[in-house]
Image (cartoon, grey):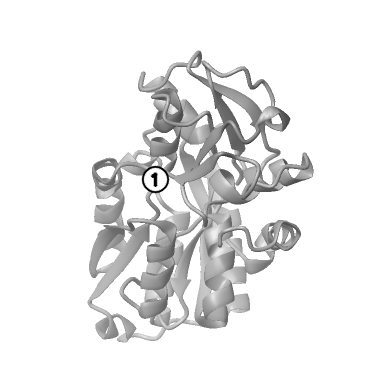
Amino acid sequence: MKRSIGIILLAAFLFTAGAGVPRPGFSAELREIKIALRPNKLASFDSLTHLPFLQYLESKLGITVKLRVGKDYKTVINELQAGIVQVAFLGPFSYVLARETMGDGIEPLVVGLRKASHRGGYNSIIVAAGKSKVMNPSQFNQDHTFAVPDPASTSGYLLPFHKLMELGLDPNADFQSVHIAGSHIATLLRVQNGQADGGASNMQTYNDLLGAGMIDIDKVRIIWRSPDLPEGPVTMRQDVPGEIKYRLLKAFIAMPRNLGVYDYKDGLEGFRPAFDRQYDVIRNIRKRVGKISG
């Protein structure tokens, strides 16, 4: 029954995306496809956990698949725009930013479903250093330093800054300083190591580090958790050949659950087709926050 639903969604996606029926020979136009990852984790971690995933895709696409881990979110967007990569794992906010830049030059392909919730969603968090007296976000002030992973991060920047602004705080003026840590892991470790009084990340990364014994709940205290956010889409360039799009979408929907990419706690259990309208909620938050990344 679940597979039948997947096939129905696949057909619906191909109809709405205008992909039509793939024609023989399209694969000859593209001998290699490059996929970019956001720097959510250490590059070595991403490469190792995604190896079975890449091998699976190669078996389904019939072409070479290569992985790139962007040094930051902007790099991933720029490489997608320049055609250096054809596919990218984007967060909700970075997808919206990419869409603003590229318009219909990109399209969301699939979105992941979480094991824990059996739906596409995750949570932003704001944390405080255990040594600080901050028990809720409204208590941050100009005596405090704050760390974020990247200005294009949904859970590590857009949502927490929106929350701070709702509380009457100006993130650009009401902290002693705001540091761009470069990744969610680096952000949380910066707080743990006493290099920042607070920071923003997501619940999944926090749980990953907690399970790996890399952070201490007494040193990195969660003081705010957002409602569920839409999961970011796997995004592709519009000019990817039609047959490759078809095979890629079919491969994601049929992907088995025993691949390395699914092996971390609270990981993904599968994929379903994604559509641009799913990210209107992120666009609305962006409008309320305004240009906060400078």
Left or right, 155 with respect to 256, comes to right
Q: Residue at x 50, y 81 (%)?
A: 105
Question: Quadrant of the rendered structure where residue 139 is?
Answer: top right
Q: Which residue is mark 1?
A: 256
Residue 138 vertical position relative to residue 40 in the rendered view, above or below: above
Q: Residue 60's spot in the image, x, y percent?
A: 31, 62
Residue 278 vertical position relative to residue 263 in the rendered view, above or below: below
Q: Residue 17's spot in the image, x, y percent?
A: 58, 77
Q: Residue at x 41, y 32 (%)?
A: 190
Q: Residue 9's spot in the image, x, y percent?
A: 60, 62
Left or right, 246 with respect to 45, comes to right
Q: Is residue 265 visible?
A: no
Mark 1 crowd level (few <14, some 14–19, many ≥20, 10 Å Cα) = few
Quarter of the image with the C terminus in it: bottom right
Q: Is residue 124 visible?
A: yes
* Secondary structure beneath label 1: loop
Question: Quadrant of the rendered structure where residue 67 is?
Answer: bottom left
Q: Residue at x 38, y 37 (%)?
A: 186
Q: Specify the farthest residue to the top.
A: 218
* Nearest the eye: 66 or 223: 223
Q: Residue 136's spot in the image, x, y percent?
A: 69, 25
* Nearest the eye: 35 or 293: 293
* Nearest the eye: 6 or 120: 120
The type of residue carrying mark 1 is Pro
* Nearest the eye: 126 or 53: 126
The total of numbered circles placed on residues is: 1
